[in-house]
């Protein structure tokens, strides 16, 4: 029986970490952050070992015994299955970020749509997102499971706790598994709000001063994220000009557009 809750913190027994990964696997599958056998979840067990979800298995159906232990170079140490095909991406993050003890990779639809469109989630639209993550950039496309993807991610892992993977999905990390999972939820939620305001044709960004105050608040809450030091993250109304990022967008049908053009041509001819 897999519990429906996990406790914060990274100091746990191996059995607890195994159950936690299975719980997060169920959460990302039930929220449609992944479908089929997509996605992967891992935790750092100790300085030498990582516990990861297996490849080619639905993350909503894992049991503790399905998980695989590897070293930090990806060599299998224990497990009857094979490690995640995206293990190299997890290991890159563990090797570059000693503060990280858990990594979650998923394909939540709205955030993944942004990744597929090459649109970063970097606007100062929501105070909570700025406190939690700063902003979420897009890493260049790399073939999943290859060095190409790790190379694309490498320049970003020091500076961000959540990254969109172009034409692919999202990776988040944190000091423990609960935080890495919450960051995945936050990214998808922010992507939905960002998309809806874009559809509305109006996005009012917070100012640089507002963002500074949020960063002070973040320090007061004891929250931290890697992106505090990145200039221009997030984009504020100071950067965008007047707080409204774009002119109002309207939509017309093809027939309406043709009628407008015909009308304009007719008026133009009448003037000659
Ligand atoms: Zn993936």
Image (cartoon, rainbow, N blue to C red):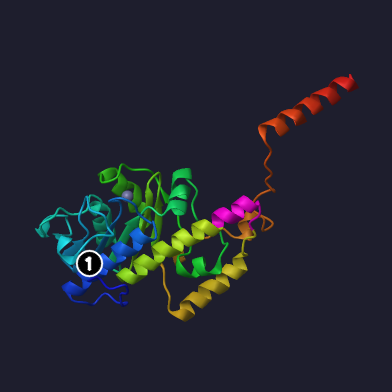
> Element at badge 1?
strand
Overall secondary structure of the magenta section: helix
* Mark 1: C-beta under 8 Å from nearest atom of ligand 1: no
Residue shown at the point (61%, 69%) measured from the top left: 209
x, y percent for residue 25: 29, 62
Q: Position of residue 212 (x, y in %)?
A: 56, 70
Of residues 143 and 111, which is closer to you in this image? Answer: 111
Seen from the viewer's position, the closer of residues 253 and 231 is 253
- Identify the residue at image location x=63%, y=56%: 203
In the image, 137: left or right of 58?
A: right
Split into 4 quadrants, where in the image is the N terminus?
Answer: bottom left
Determine if the magenta segment contains residue 256.
no
Query: Residue at point 67% right, 32% down?
Result: 254
- Quadrant of the rendering where the C terminus is positioned: top right
Q: Which residues are magenta?
A: 194-203
In this orientation, does residue 80 appear?
Answer: yes
Instruction: Identify the residue under disc 1.
Output: 44
Quadrant of the image occupied by residue 260: top right
Residue 122 in sight in this render: no
The image shows residue 122, relative to residue 265, as above or below, that is below
Q: Position of residue 234 (x, y in %)?
A: 53, 60
């Amino acid at each position: 029986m897999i519990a429906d809750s996990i406790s914060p913190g990274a100091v746990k027994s191996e059995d607890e970490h195994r159950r936690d990964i299975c719980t997060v696997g169920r959460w990302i599958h039930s929220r449609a952050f992944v479908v089929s056998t997509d996605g992967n979840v891992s935790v750092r067990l100790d300085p030498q070992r990582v516990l990861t979800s297996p490849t080619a298995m639905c993350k909503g159906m894992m049991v503790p015994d399905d998980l695989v232990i590897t070293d930090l170079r990806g060599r299998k140490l224990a497990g009857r299955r094979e490690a995640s095909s995206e293990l190299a991406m997890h290991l890159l993050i563990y090797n570059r970020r000693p503060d990280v003890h858990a990594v979650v990779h998923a394909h939540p639809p709205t955030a993944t749509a942004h990744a597929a469109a090459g649109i970063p989630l970097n606007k100062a639209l929501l105070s909570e997102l700025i406190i939690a993550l700063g902003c979420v950039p897009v890493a260049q496309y790399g073939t999943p499971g290859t060095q190409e993807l790790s190379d694309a991610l490498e320049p970003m892992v020091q500076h961000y706790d959540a990254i969109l993977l172009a034409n692919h999905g999202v990776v988040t990390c944190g000091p423990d598994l609960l935080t890495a999972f919450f960051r995945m939820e936050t990214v998808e939620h922010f992507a939905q709000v960002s998309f809806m305001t874009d559809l509305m044709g109006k996005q009012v960004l917070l100012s640089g001063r507002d963002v500074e105050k949020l960063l002070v608040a973040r320090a007061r809450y004891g929250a931290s994220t890697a992106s505090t030091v990145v200039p221009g993250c997030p984009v504020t109304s100071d950067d965008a000009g007047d707080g409204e990022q774009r002119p109002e967008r309207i939509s017309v049908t093809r027939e309406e557009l043709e009628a407008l053009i015909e009308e304009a041509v007719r008026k133009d001819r009448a003037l000659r």
